[in-house]
């Protein structure tokens, strides 16, 4: 059973650029969620995908967008990067619906630095 | 008011002591609750789920009080390796995780 893998592990971008982060879900999981974690804070929910459709979104602007593919892997895209976007971006997979009660599996994250 | 609130910490505790973490949640529709552990610059890892009946896993005991919307985690006989940030998490009615800010625990020899 493979866990959640994220790429890249680290990234440095310039303000105004665009970035794409990738996530492969754990085998058997059909739901992927993305979180932003700033230093010293808890993760903040960005959005969630279930069977290729967005089924929940946190308080993030439209320049944060995503995709889920038929194999349940996912991408997070951020346009017009701002300095405050510097954070650890976490991807988590789970079973959909009631299956979420069994918990989420997290990837090791992508650390994004915007300069 | 934050949806999930925890003690701000940090907790500085001698090795072998018992540590208690408290957490409250505001959304009574929250379905499930978890404690996650996060080491510095690493991803959160599930420590244990929290049930109304209380559950124990070795030195760790978690408790949920739905009437008070309160969750706790107790660590007995603390070890140096328990040093980490402990995050209280609620699963809301949309099956989304709502996180507390975390409480940092530092175990001293």
Image (tube, coloured by chain):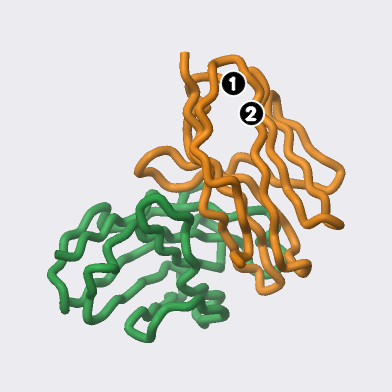
Chain colours: A green, B orange
**Residue B19 image label:** 2
Relative horizontal placement of residue B2, taking residue A9 as reference (left or right)? right
Work out whether residue B49 or residue B64 is closer to the camera in this orientation and state it: B64
Asked if disc 1 and disc 2 are in contact, CB closer than 8 Å, the reply is yes
Picture quadrant of residue B69: bottom right
Relative horizontal placement of residue A77, taking residue B81 as reference (left or right)? left
The residue sitting at 47% across, 49% down in the picture is A3
Relative horizontal placement of residue B107, taking residue A88 as reference (left or right)? right
Residue of label 1:
B78
Label 2 environment density (alpha carbons within 10 Å; few <14, some 14–19, many ≥20)? some
Where residue B5 appears, x then y in whole percent? 61, 55
The residue sitting at 43% across, 60% down in the picture is A91
**Subunit ID for the residue under disc 2:** B
**Subunit ID for the residue under disc 1:** B
The residue sitting at 69% across, 59% down in the picture is B25
Residue B14 to residue B60: above or below: above
Where residue A70 appears, x then y in whole percent? 46, 75
Residue B19 to residue A12: above or below: above
The residue sitting at 79% across, 48% down in the picture is B64
Q: Tell which tag, 1 or 2, sits nearer the viewer.
A: 2
Q: Earlier in the sequence, mark 1 or mark 2?
A: 2
Relative horizontal placement of residue A92, taking residue B66 as reference (left or right)? left
């Amino acid at each position: 059973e493979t866990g959640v893998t994220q790429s890249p592990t680290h990234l440095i971008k310039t303000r105004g650029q665009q970035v794409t982060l990738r996530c492969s879900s754990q085998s058997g999981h059909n739901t992927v969620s993305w979180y932003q974690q700033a230093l010293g804070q808890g993760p903040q929910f960005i959005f969630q995908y279930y069977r290729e459709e967005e089924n929940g979104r946190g308080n993030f602007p439209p320049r944060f967008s995503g995709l889920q593919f038929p194999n349940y892997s996912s991408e997070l895209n951020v346009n017009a990067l701002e300095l405050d976007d510097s954070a650890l971006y976490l991807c988590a997979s789970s079973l959909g619906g009631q299956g979420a009660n069994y918990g989420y599996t997290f990837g090791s994250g992508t650390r994004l630095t915007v300069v | 008011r934050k949806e999930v609130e925890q003690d701000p910490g940090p907790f500085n505790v001698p090795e072998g002591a018992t540590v208690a973490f408290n957490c409250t949640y505001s959304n009574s529709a929250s379905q499930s609750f978890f404690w996650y552990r996060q080491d510095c610059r690493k991803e959160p890892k599930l420590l244990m789920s929290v049930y109304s009946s209380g559950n124990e896993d070795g030195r760790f005991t978690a408790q949920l009080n739905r009437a008070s919307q309160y969750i706790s985690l107790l660590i007995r006989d603390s070890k140096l390796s328990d040093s980490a940030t402990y995050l209280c998490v609620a699963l809301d009615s949309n099956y989304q995780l709502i996180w507390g800010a975390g409480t940092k625990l530092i175990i001293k020899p």
